[in-house]
Image: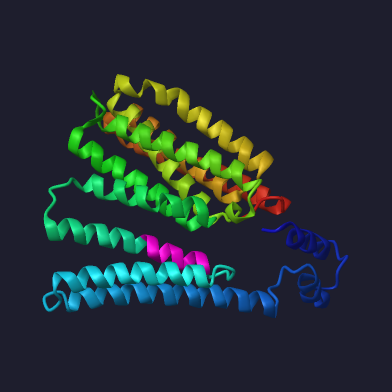
Amino acid sequence: MSKPKALIQQWAQQDAIRPDKIPQALAIAEVTPSAFHWRTFLDKLLLANGGGLLLFGIIFFFAFNWQELTRFHKFAMIEGLIVASLYAYHHWYSRSSAPTILLASSVLVGVLLAFFGQTYQTGADAWQLFAAWAALIAPWVLLARFSSLWFLWLALINIALSLYYQVFHGFWGWGFGSEGMQFIQFSLNTSALMLWELAATRYDWLSGRREVRLLAVASGASVTWLTLDAIFNNHHELSLIVVCYPLWLVVGYWVYRRWLGDLFMLAGGWLTLIVTSTAFIANLFLHHGNSESFFLLTVWVLGVSVIAINWLKKIAQEGNHEA
């Protein structure tokens, strides 16, 4: 909930604004979208849909005509699409739609690499495809100043690391279990999240919340999985997570409660806390198998959920946090 909207609602409750004047107040405060805002939203929506449909059309074209096309024509068409998209990006560089064209070109690079590996049967592992893909588009990522392209690059790095571990079960001669892989991904995504938030204070093109929230979901999923594994399996390799998880919660609370003000992030922190605390209680009591244990677990989940909901509602009413 934005701050102007919260203030207007507060003034309306205090009868400082007449009920019939509330829509006008919302319009003046630019809480209610104007015609310009609707045109901008529809322009971006139609652009995204058009770009997605174009990519799907290219994929289905190749799938339907795969047997009839020669190897030369297949390579020529994919490479031609990459060159055409780069030219379009250069030609319409000043337009807001230009980064989307570069994003489509980056996806086509992955299609080209996959087709090359399938055609010539290079014998390369799957992780090498994603690592090469990330390396080839890295200059575009650095130059484009487009948050979605950065997120695509980070996703490719995550996939490459996961696939590399599945092949070698370790990194550079150091072997470890799947917990180590999760910890590496947790460290990577959390570091990327912190750097993204710091960079967003300086670069406006990183100020969108969609990609950073997806990074937070990835970081939260990894730390929650590691904490659950430590609770149920009691691995000595996971002793570090006993320190990292509380620290992750405390730092996240300070950043998104005191500094940036993001209700989504705070709700995610509560979700991980409910899941891990419930798992801890379940591990303590449910092995007895009696009905009292299930009742205690139910009461705990309901009680903590009510506390979380009331706390988040109170934060939302302050109007200082982005929903």
Quadrant position of residue 9: bottom right
Question: Which residue is drawn at the image coordinates 37% and 76% (left, top)?
Answer: 53
Expressed as whole percent of the image width and height from the top left, the position of residue 214 reads 46, 51
Relative horizontal placement of residue 191, taking residue 180 as reference (left or right): right
Expressed as whole percent of the image width and height from the top left, the position of residue 133 reads 32, 52
> Nearest the camera: 323 or 286?
323
SS assignment for the magenta stretch, majority: helix
Question: Which residue is drawn at the image coordinates 31% and 29% (left, top)?
Answer: 180
- Asked if one can make out residue 319 in the rendered structure from this viewpoint, the answer is yes
Question: Which residue is drawn at the image coordinates 24% and 29% (left, top)?
Answer: 177
Expressed as whole percent of the image width and height from the top left, the position of residue 104 reads 40, 66
Count of marks overlaid on the render = 0
Q: Residue furthest right?
A: 16
> Nearest the camera: 181 or 294?
181
Give the magenta-colored segment's residue range.
98-106
Expressed as whole percent of the image width and height from the top left, the position of residue 67 reads 11, 75
- Asked if one can make out residue 292 in the rendered structure from this viewpoint, the answer is no
Relative horizontal placement of residue 224, taking residue 248 as reference (left or right): left
> Nearest the camera: 233 or 142?
142
